[in-house]
Image (tube, rainbow, N blue to C red):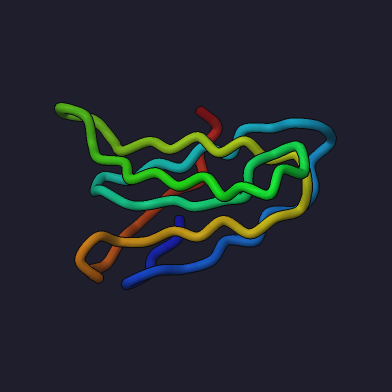
């Protein structure tokens, strides 16, 4: 579990092929990462919890990269790297 205030950067090692990095939280958070395939594009999303569930972000990763996470309003966040 990653616990932070404001924002943090998560280093992701190179996977064997295209993989999905799944991030879960009880509260809303933002995520930003380079698009896979060498594209010069950054993909960003703001995720919020579903009714009675978690906020979930799925990030496609095909090389070593850095994913930026943020907490709306600069409050504290707790984000878990999940298997599903």
Residue 53 position (above or below residue 36):
above
State the residue at coordinates (16%, 29%).
52
State the residue at coordinates (70%, 39%).
36
Does residue 36 appear left or right of residue 4 in this picture?
right
State the residue at coordinates (76%, 37%).
37
Q: Quadrant of the N terminus?
A: bottom left
- How many dots with numbers? 0
Furthest toward the left, the residue is: 51
Does residue 10 appear left or right of residue 75 in this picture?
right
- Location of residue 74 in the rendering, given as x and y in whole percent from the top left corner: 25, 70
State the residue at coordinates (45%, 47%).
44
- Location of residue 66 in the rendering, given as x and y in whole percent from the top left corner: 63, 59
Q: Quadrant of residue 57?
A: top left
Residue 1 position (above or below residue 5):
above
Q: Nearer the viewer, residue 30 or 83?
A: 30
Residue 48 position (above or below residue 31):
above
Q: Nearer the viewer, residue 13 or 33?
A: 33
Q: Quadrant of residue 20?
A: top right
Does residue 14 appear left or right of residue 66 in this picture?
right
Furthest toward the front, the residue is: 40
């Amino acid at each position: 579990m990653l616990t932070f205030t404001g924002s943090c950067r998560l280093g992701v090692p190179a996977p064997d092929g295209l993989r999905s990095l799944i991030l879960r939280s009880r509260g809303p958070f933002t995520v930003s990462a380079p698009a896979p395939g060498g594209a010069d594009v950054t993909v960003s999303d703001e995720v919020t919890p579903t009714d009675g569930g978690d906020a979930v972000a799925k990030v496609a990763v095909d090389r070593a990269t850095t994913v930026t996470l943020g907490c709306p309003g600069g409050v504290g966040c707790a984000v878990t790297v999940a298997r599903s």
